[in-house]
Image: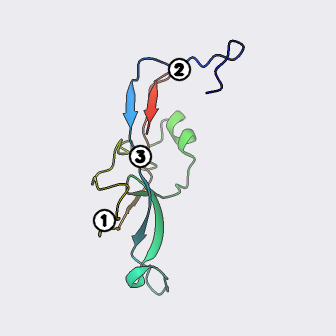
Amino acid sequence: SLDSAQFPANVPQKVDKHFFFTISLGTNPCQQNQTCQGPNGTMFAASVNNVSFTTPTTALLQSHFTGQSNGVYAPYFPSSPLHPFNYTGNPPNNTMVSNGTKVVVLPFNTSVELV
């Protein structure tokens, strides 16, 4: 820790929201009339908790603050993997990921633990 008397690390003792994120490389079906180099003709996709991010046409914060977030993003990003597996062993056989623009909406000043 870089904690010192001059620069104290005031870590919150109460955690409001717990997250357990897994970052992985999965696959998506190849788009029609396209050649993909993933296994069985799929394309590779990075994901967090088995969700691959899809870039929206409207900025996320802009849509939230203007109250026009309906259809821009889904406010139910998973706080832990939907399908638990051995995170330090062999990867699971099902590597297909879902695509989406999913977020977690947190109240101001929420204390978060991210593992």
Dot 1 corresponds to which residue? 92
Compared to residue 103, the image places residue 39 above or below, namely: below
Q: CA distance from mark 2 to mark 1?
A: 36 Å
**Residue drawn at point x = 37 percent, y = 63 percent:** 97
Q: CA distance from mark 2 to mark 3?
A: 21 Å
Examine the image and state in which quarter residue 75 appears: top left
Callout 1 secondary element: loop
Q: Please name which of the two marks, 3 or 1, marks the residue nearer to the observer.
A: 1
**Residue drawn at point x = 53 percent, y = 33 percent:** 65
Q: Which mark is residue 21?
A: 3
Examine the image and state in which quarter residue 95 appears: bottom left
Kind of residue indicated by mark 2: Val
Dot 2 corresponds to which residue? 11
Examine the image and state in which quarter residue 40 appears: bottom left
Are the residues flagged by discs 3 and 1 in contact, CB closer than 8 Å? no
Q: CA distance from mark 3 to mark 1?
A: 16 Å
Kind of residue indicated by mark 3: Phe
Other residues around mark 1 within 10 Å, as few (<14) / some (14–19) / many (≥20):
few
Compared to residue 41, the image places residue 7 above or below, namely: above
Are the residues flagged by discs 2 and 3 in contact, CB closer than 8 Å? no
Kind of residue indicated by mark 1: Pro
Residue 34 pos. (x, y %): 49, 85
